[in-house]
Amino acid sequence: MAEELRFDPSGLDKWTEENRFEVTRERLIEYAKATNDPIERHLAGDVASPVFAIVPVFQSLLEPALEVVPPSLFGNVLHGEQDFRFHRPIRPGDKLVSRGKMIGYQGLPKGTRATVYLETRDEAGELVNEQYVMFFVRGFDTGEERGELAPEHKFDEALRANSAAGKVSQHVDDDQTFRYGPAAGDPMPIHLDEEIAKASGLPGIIAHGLCTMAFTSWALLTELGESDVDRLRRLAVRFAKPVLPGQDLSTTIWRAGSAGGVTSYAYETKVGDTVVISDGLAEISEGTS
């Protein structure tokens, strides 16, 4: 008789071991180039582009889930949402210390949502960034809700009645995934091998979701943040549909509000008429802190 599959709630809120990562200028430059980032400070490696924050934690991204999710379900896991909270940018020479824990899950008819929380500090203990990573386990309903999920960043449909604050067009290069994979340390074969991607039910190689998110980060910064990464406080998205190499992206941005010297922007990114990034949210301060 097959063993009953179930999530283990006792694994919630258990921190992983600390992971250490030393930031080099060369790695920052490689990541900026791999995401077609035009911002000079990023291309010079003087400061990291925002989504580079995933690189120091990438190897331990799923590690907290091992305490909760049955290993046989890992093939059903999709990266559904990503939410960065930036306390300061990453810079060359930083020696970063990261750890993570799964904080909650929610069973739904088509699968289970699960949230991993990650924090990155420098060697002096200063908090550099926090991340909420929402995974979706396809086809498995836990039948219960435990702990807490990531904070909401849902798009307010009423904003569509307003004029857009900006619109940015971008192109995903044919070789984008082959440049992004090494730069991010992400060797997933669905981004690099056509046959494996098709065997997984995809139309072919797909772009990394975080690469698409990185595109939107520099779109927002160049359009509304004077290309100053120091001003970005939060960046959150839901990965709605896969992006293919060679496709064109169009990101539309709406001003959502302002409080305490920080302006919130809602956005979505499309390929043609298809939304590929939804529930986008960026918080940009009015000046460098």
Image (cartoon, grey):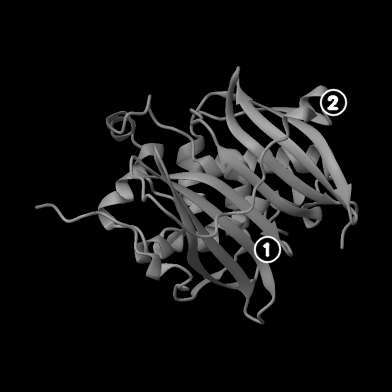
Seen as rendered, the residue at the extreme left is: 1
Residue closer to the observer: 109 or 129? 109
Closest to the camera, between mark 2 and mark 1, is: 2
Q: In the image, what residue type sits under mark 1?
A: Ile
Can residue 285 be spotted in the picture? Answer: yes
Occupied quadrant, residue 173: top right
Residue 39, position in %: x, y?
A: 75, 45
Can residue 167 be spotted in the picture? Answer: no
On the rendered image, what quadrant is the C terminus found in? bottom right
257 vs 87, left or right, is right
Q: Which mark is residue 162?
A: 2
Up/down of 135 relative to 278, above or below: below
Up/down of 60 relative to 243, above or below: below
Seen as rendered, the residue at the extreme top is: 273
Seen as rendered, the residue at the extreme front is: 144
Spatial separation of the CA atoms under disc 2 and disc 1: 35 Å
Q: In the image, what residue type sits under mark 2?
A: Asn
Up/down of 178 relative to 107, above or below: above
Residue 235, position in %: x, y?
A: 68, 49
Residue closer to the observer: 191 or 118? 118
| Crowd around label 2: few <14 · some 14–19 · many ≥20 (10 Å) | few
Image point (27%, 31%), residue name: 199
In the rendered structure, which disc, 2 or 1, sits on the residue that comes first in sequence? Answer: 1
56 vs 5, left or right, is right
| Crowd around label 1: few <14 · some 14–19 · many ≥20 (10 Å) | many
Tag 2's secondary structure?
A: loop
65 vs 286, left or right, is left
* Residue to which mark 1 is pinned: 90
Residue 134, position in %: x, y?
A: 51, 50
Numbered disc total:
2
Residue closer to the observer: 155 or 267? 155
